[in-house]
Amino acid sequence: MNSLNEGMYMEHILDLYKNPLNFGILENADFKERCFNPSCGDEVEIQAKVNSNKIEDVKFIGKGCAICVASASLLTDNIKNKSLDELNNLTREDMMKLVGIEVGPARMKCITCPLVSLRNGINSFNGGQNARS
Amino acid sequence: MINITKNKIERLREDFPILSRKINNKQLVYLDNSATTQKPMQVIDAITDYYTNYNSNVHRGLHKLSEEATVKFEESHEKVADFINADFQELIFTKGTTESINLLAYSLSSKLKKGDEILITQMEHHSNLVPWQQIAKSFGFKLNYIKIKNDGTLDLDDIKLSKKTKIVSCVHTSNFLGTINPVKEIGKIAHENNSLFVLDGAQSVPHMPIDVKNIDCDFLAFSSHKMLGPMGIGALYGKKELLEEMEPFNYGGDMILEVRFDDTKFNELPWKFEAGTPNVAGAIGFGASIDYLNKIGMENIKNYSNELTGYALKRLSEIKNLEIYGPLNPEKRGSLISFNLINIHPHDTTSLLDDYGIAVRGGHHCVMPTMKLMGLTGSTRASFYFYNTKEEIDYLAETLEKVKGVFK
């Protein structure tokens, strides 16, 4: 892997930034939670419909850098029909695998912001109080 | 005084070892001076000298080391006070601008009544917003804002003062828009209303001659690390008669004259506001940075800053799809330019510039409400100091074209 930042900006990332997947409002969502990244002002809100404890449909809205938007696109595209319990175990390493790049500490929040939104959403859907931001 | 010429800058740059560092095999181009400036060897040596040769506590030892440390520590107070044309007793060392403003907010809160008003502007750094906002919440004061006009300057017609407005606090140079505010004028308006006038000088004191008597501010806060000195030390200037009336912010050692079990007599100024063992090494480094700046001359630094900022404004405005925020007249702005490349997130721009050895800031620059007002979530900011060159600005402009190339 290229140690320069430019290595992160692979074609699929740039494509997803320009044309994000699952971007928009989901009517009648069962949960919607946002993650705010205070270091850059990025915001991602994940909205999902849940059926039998599984994600039936999911969309996101928000503003972010190329890494963040690509990450939100790929996350929302990969969690349909997956159980909430399974999704609760997703890690930052899973996110890097999913997005196909490795990021350092400076950009870690960009890639994990959508995951935090998802966790917050699942947590609030389950009525829990342990949402992490 | 000698003008800052190209040769002179090359000689000055030799005092800053970090400027020869390579980043990703490229020469470091450090354009993040609004966040913090680099330190010359003279400052690093002064701090090393203290820890190596006379490290000891101040104001209490009767031994030689403590005597030397106390002399140097107090000399630094004097240098910083002189630098802004203040008296020795009027200059308090703090951790930095943020602590200076917190000190003020908490100490002045006891002088205000419920329902009193504090006026700040819509372009304040969080450090000159959150302290006022929080004391307003705690004590029932009202916080008002002077609006920003579309050109990034303050709308002075929007200054709404009442008998209840007790404090007006304002940033001198905005760390995001770069705007240099007409602080003498704002101070005059505040004083005509019998309001106290507080100035946040974090981005102005490092870049231009500052005379608190001429500006006629009641208080001025600034930080050492944005003007060649170490982190963790800064200053609060206050008019003597006001500081004398104010309650201390921190209580403890060094700020006392006499302590009994039932009461305490506070020390004289400025020590009344410097409780506990101070940051002696920081103070000595701060003093050394003032010596360094005085050697170049603040008028020279200001003139060169204007020239460099003017050049950067010209080069950046030549770039297609690049949006610059704040006033476009270099005389009216500090040595910084915030911008965005259209459709490229500032984080991405900043990361890609880093590949080329260029250090700039990307993000909200601690002015979240101002950003929101302008419909932005962030920007990239290039900020300069006297050791930067036109060649570095050319390199920034050329590299920004390459960043655009990645997103094509």
Image (spheres, rainbow, N blue to C red):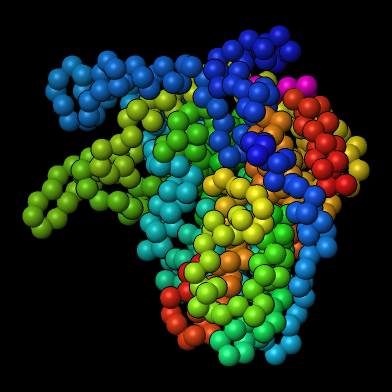
Is residue B67 placed above or below B161 in the rendered structure? Answer: above
Residue B121 vs residue A14: left or right? left
Residue drawn at x 24%, y 29% as measured from the top left: B58
Q: Is B22 inside the magenta-drawn segment?
A: no
Q: Quadrant of the N terminus of chain A?
A: top right
Residue drawn at x 72%, y 61% as measured from the top left: A69
Is residue B353 placed above or below B193 in the rendered structure? Answer: above
Front-lying residue, A110 or B92: A110
The answer to which image quadrant residue B76 occupies is top left
Give the overall secondary structure of the magenta segment: loop
Residue B407 vs residue B39: left or right? right
Residue drawn at x 22%, y 25% as measured from the top left: B56
Residue B397, image x, y percentages: 82, 33
Residue drawn at x 66%, y 67% as measured from the top left: A75
Is residue A53 in view? yes
What are the residue bounds of the magenta stretch? B384-391
Is residue B152 placed above or below B236 in the rendered structure? Answer: below
